[in-house]
Image (tube, rainbow, N blue to C red):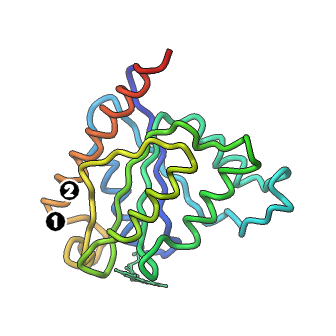
Amino acid sequence: MSNVKILGFAGSLRQKSYNRAALRAAQQLLPQEASLELFDLAPIPPFSEDEEKTPPAAVTEFKRQIRQADAILIATPEYNYSIPGVLKNAIDWASRPYGDSAWSGKPVAILGASAGKLGTARAQYHLRQVFVFLDMHPLNKPEVMIGPAADAFGADGELKDEKTREMIRKQLAALVQWTRCLKQGLP
Ligand SMILES: Cc1cc2nc3c(=O)[nH]c(=O)nc-3n(C[C@H](O)[C@H](O)[C@H](O)COP(=O)(O)O)c2cc1C
């Protein structure tokens, strides 16, 4: 397996989102033989089980890109000590209809930036719980929890903090290694 294709998305629609900015930084911090495409969750409507067998085009495209990717990178904000509805909504769409989930068996890494000092820790552990039912393979370490985000990013949205950049670099390298390891284990 040469190039590892990673699909990244952020659970924030905010124009100046720190989490979206963290993903843009990640694109500069990839190891060799890895690529990171970003998907914007904005066009994904609220989930309705009535529509899960005839999903909107944005959901079909999201599922297609997930399936094409070797690994997933999620940048989650923390809303009220948990994951934002926008993120859970997108995850739910791509998990349906039952038996046609796009997530099964995917390696996944999480990073997150928040206003609080814990840097999305609580949201990240909620997200890990969701991965259990989705049968995903989360990378355990390194964890990347960026908080307070305003200290790490400049006004231009650039990730300035060198230690945080290094953590993301290490996480991406570990995700690529984890992905290769899982692929080799398959018959
Ligand atoms: C509804 C809501 C709930 C929030 N709850 C938390 C929280 O539980 N913990 C925290 O650290 N920050 C919380 N925040 C602040 C976010 O960390 C902050 O808005 C952050 O910038 C959101 O990520 P983004 O920049 O990617 O949009 C909350 C913000 C909103 C809008």
Which residue is situated farthest in the left direction here? 163
> Which residue corresponds to the image point at 37% horizontal and 26% vertical from the top-left?
180
Image: 21 above or below 25? below
Image: 148 above or below 22? below
From the top left corner, tell me how far across and down residue 182 is, in percent. 41, 28
Residue 8 in the figure: left or right of residue 173: right
Q: Secondary structure at mark 2?
A: helix
Q: Report the residue marked by disc 2.
A: 165
From the top left corner, tell me how far across and down residue 58 is, in percent. 70, 55
Residue 159 in the figure: left or right of residue 55: left
Mark 2 and mark 1 in contact (Cβ < 8 Å)? yes
Which one is in front, 59 or 38? 59
Residue 161's disc is 1
Say few, some or many: other residues with alpha carbon within 10 Å of mark 1 (under 14 / 14 to 19 / 20 or more).
some
Residue type highlighted by circle 1? Asp
* Ligand 1 shown in quarter: bottom left
